[in-house]
Amino acid sequence: MGNPDSIPFLDLVTPHQQLEEELVSAFRKALRTAAFVGGPAVETFESAFAAFCGTRHCVAVNSGTDALRFALIAAGVKSGDVVITVPNTFIATTEAISQAGALPEFVDIDERTYNMDPGKLRQYLESKCRVQAGRLISLRSGRPVTAIVPVHLYGQTADMNAINEAAAKYRLVVIEDACQAHGAEYFSSAAGSIGRAAAFSFYPGKNLGACGEGGAITTNDEELAHVTRMLRDHGQSKKYFHDLEGYNGRLDSIQTAILSIKLDHLGDWNRRRREAAAKYNSLFAAVPDVVTPYEPEYSTAVYHLYVIRVQNRPGLQAHLNETGIGTGIHYPVPLHMQNAYKNLGYQKGDFPITERVANEIVSLPMFPTITAEQQQRVVDAVAAFQGKTRAATVSVRA
Ligand SMILES: *Cc1c(COP(=O)(O)O)cnc(C)c1O
């Protein structure tokens, strides 16, 4: 990153420089009171994040992966159950499902939003499952389907009314994977307040990131909140009295103090991400053959990532890298085609939309402090490449 003209994919330094004094004094306070695990800093953050999401409860845990695992277990997902999700997500989604003892099964996504297609979900529940003795059984695995995990990918909520309706019909639990969607809205409900519970990640690169690892469960369900509090703390509700076997899954006090400081800025950072996305959209309107993000009427997205689609993705990515512009691919290999999931028995071709999209997506630089000038340079670089590609294909066709 020696080149001063290079544009990083993500700038995690500037926001922390701006807050450095406050962050350091939070650390100093923890040192001087030896408050490292539990205590008021954790509770203060939990109340503030619950308020931010419009939920009654927030339970801070050590990662988004464990937030999802604990939420699934607390919602009653049992060993041998099936949990339905999408194949175009980070592997943490399905790791949490497997670690809860369940088996992930997939439905394909909507080509415009990249989120779970509620029509395909309904189809799966109706024609790939059967009701037996009041339970919904997956024909694929012969196991009971008990939950759905929609992922709010790139900071945009899935179509939650449609998903919740399908789930209600078969009495399935819906747990939101909101790990990329802090502050996103579905109509006027915040991500994290729409399913039975939700999982957030505070990994440093997320819209709200710790200076380390972190995560949280949000829910309005008192009992679920209670059980997740026990699960994160060795199953105890009182010290050394274990009602169940849990985990070491707490979030430490220094991270929660840091998150409280950063949470005050999240609304502003999300607004800047939205402005940057709108600017990209308008600049890309003049560039041929670039598919820009689509926001349905229900969505107020928070652009954890700004993802475009092009035909020659490897070419474009190489060109941007040469120009000093950071890019990413989220995600290059759909989960059903990962080595880790060979045992699930899916084939290439099973989820055609996910597979096509995975070959065409590129994530461009997106962070709250990105400048208009940087965005212009990104778009100019994409335009230069797309212009060349188009000229080449036109002359081949001619
Ligand atoms: C980041 C992420 C997770 C996992 O969060 P960690 O805090 O890294 O464990 C889960 N799901 C999605 C969609 C994510 O982006």
Image: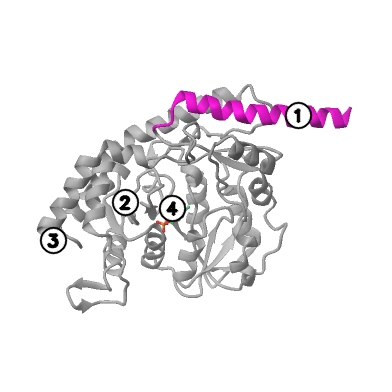
The magenta stretch spans which residues?
Answer: 369-398
* Residue that numbered label 1 is attached to: 390
Counting residues from the start of the chain, the first of labels 2 and 1 encountered is 2
Whether residue 117 appears in this view of the structure is yes
User: Disc 4 on helix, strand or loop?
Assistant: strand
* Residue that numbered label 4 is attached to: 176
User: Does the beta carbon at disc 4 come under 8 Å from ligand 1?
Assistant: no
Horizontal side of 211 relative to 388 (left or right) equals: left
Horizontal side of 142 relative to 189 (left or right) equals: right
* Residue that numbered label 2 is attached to: 211
Task: Report if the CB atoms under discs 4 and 1 are less than 8 Å apart.
Answer: no
Residue 393 falls inside the magenta stretch: yes
Counting residues from the start of the chain, the first of labels 3 and 2 encountered is 3
Counting residues from the start of the chain, the first of labels 4 and 2 encountered is 4
Instruction: Look at the picture and state if 391 lies above or below 340.
Output: above
The residues bearing labels 1 and 3 have C-alpha atoms spaced at a distance of: 62 Å
Q: Residues within 10 Å of mark 4 (few under 14, many from 20)?
A: many
